[in-house]
Image (cartoon, grey):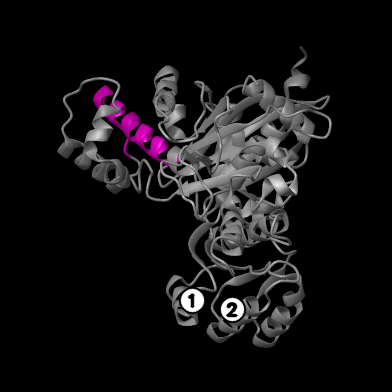
Amino acid sequence: MEVVEMQANILVYDVGSTYTKAAAFALKDRRFTFLGRGQSPTTLHDVMEGARRAEAAIQAQGVQFAAEMKRYSSCSAAGGLRMVALGYMPRVTAKAAKEVAMTAGARVMQVVSAEEPLSFRREVLMEINPDIILLSGGTDGGDEGCALENAEMICELHGKATVIVACNKYAQRAVAELFDKAGVAYVRVPNIMPTIHELNIKPAREAIHEQFIRQITRARGLVEFRAGLSDQAVVPTPGAVLLASELLAKGTYEQEGAGSLILVDIGGATTDIHSALPELEKLSIEERGLIINNEKQFSYRTVEGNLGLRVSATGIPEAVGPNAVIRAMDGDYGVTPDEVLRFAQHLEDHPDYIPADEREKSLERAMATCAINTALRRHAGHYADTADPVMGIMAGTAIGRDLRRVERVLCVGGIFVHSDKQAAEEMVLRCFEDPGISLLPQEKPRIVQDRDYILYAMGVLGKYYPDAAFSFLKEYTGS
């Protein structure tokens, strides 16, 4: 093969709070070839400096860069937007608002419905002082009063937040007039829940992405960095990973998707579980029911903010108990419950700590297993253990997100990159050994580890080259 054919002409960055990563690809004949990746500590005083060092790390591997290089990026350096979601009914539009925020990579600090007193809603906004407020409420033609009441409250408080107006379309004009008069920054998008059976999250998700971009540009001085990108629409990193899993599951207009999957994304602060079940899009409205109950959505993500391997490490033994962590270890190292608690506290106090020996590595993997196991069971549905005549549910009825037919689990996070491949795989497989009443896969799923850390890149590139990105993902994951 000629050298010129292996020149990188696509580069995708991920600017994180700690490291700036870059992945290089050759795009030819609608196919991506992965050529190399590099990383460098993020240089907050000048993001370009860290980006150039990441590029240099790739070039040091012998990868040549084409003269006409296209550059794209995701970013998590700003740590996510602080968001409050306001809605009408707690199990309907308020929960829809939370799902929109989650899939956009925002940090949802509070979801508040109209059932809460106005004084409580006001207190929440004053205490959290969010970067963004997602104003939902009412299907099109439904309730308008809640959205107007919340809009008046926002005008009175006049905080720093930008408001995403995603409520009943018939209330939006009056809401906009209130905000214009009070000088409140806002963006109008279509109702996130136009009918009781329909969830329309894409416009609101894109609006949140744009607010994310504005925040990181202001907070991290990324103006010059964005100017060098082919598209300045920087994608939040959690959103990019989610987009990659959705693309793989669903496919494109020209290519059939790989089918249902689970994505496990464990980091220093959170453990995120995402499931994509494309077969649910074929359901009729009657079969779909109240889509906002989550089990019938194509794409659904949950975030466990107290289960992480560094800044929230103590949340793991608090959630499952130190003895559960010890039982999850892949060997008998004589670890005591007190040692588990001390180790978790040490990781929390020293986020850049690297386990010193196999004993500590096994303990870290055990903590990861417990975090993933807990997060999976909170994400998945379950069999009802008792009858509920009021709801028409018999004991043994499957309730919630049904993952029983999922055959593939994608795994993202530093623990997978830096652990032995087999040990990391066993760490996840243990979570599926005894599903109990949870609606987890019936057969042992195939574990796919993102050891090259490039799922985020495919999520970004899927926006511009969907068929090439899908083909790459299919081969990369062995689908």
Identify the residue under disc 2. 150
Residue depicted at x 54% and y 74%: 114
The residue most toward the top is 1
Q: Is residue 35 left or right of residue 330?
A: right
Magenta region, residue range: 353-375
At label 2, counting other C-alpha atoms closer than 10 Å, the crowd grade (few under 14, some 14-19, many 20 or more) is: many
Magenta-colored stretch includes residue 109: no
Q: Is residue 40 left or right of residue 277?
A: left
Residue depicted at x 67% and y 35%: 458
Magenta-colored stretch includes residue 365: yes
Mark 2, secondary structure of its residue: helix
* Residue 286 seen in the figure: yes
25 or 119, which is in the foreground? 119
Residue depicted at x 32% and y 30%: 366
Identify the residue under disc 1. 121
Q: Quadrant of the N terminus?
A: top right
Residue depicted at x 47% and y 28%: 417
Amino acid type, label 2 = Asn
Q: Is residue 363 above or below residue 92?
A: above
* Residue 356 seen in the figure: no
At label 1, counting other C-alpha atoms closer than 10 Å, the crowd grade (few under 14, some 14-19, many 20 or more) is: many
5 or 298, which is in the foreground? 298
Q: Is residue 111 left or right of residue 356?
A: right
Amino acid type, label 1 = Arg
Give the percent coordinates (x, y) of residue 101. Answer: 58, 57
Q: Quadrant of the C terminus?
A: top right
Q: Is residue 10 above or below residue 289?
A: above
Distance (Cα) linking label 1 and label 2: 8 Å
Give the percent coordinates (x, y) of residue 416. Answer: 45, 28
| Label pair 1/2, CB-CB below 8 angstroms | yes
Give the percent coordinates (x, y) of residue 102. Answer: 56, 53
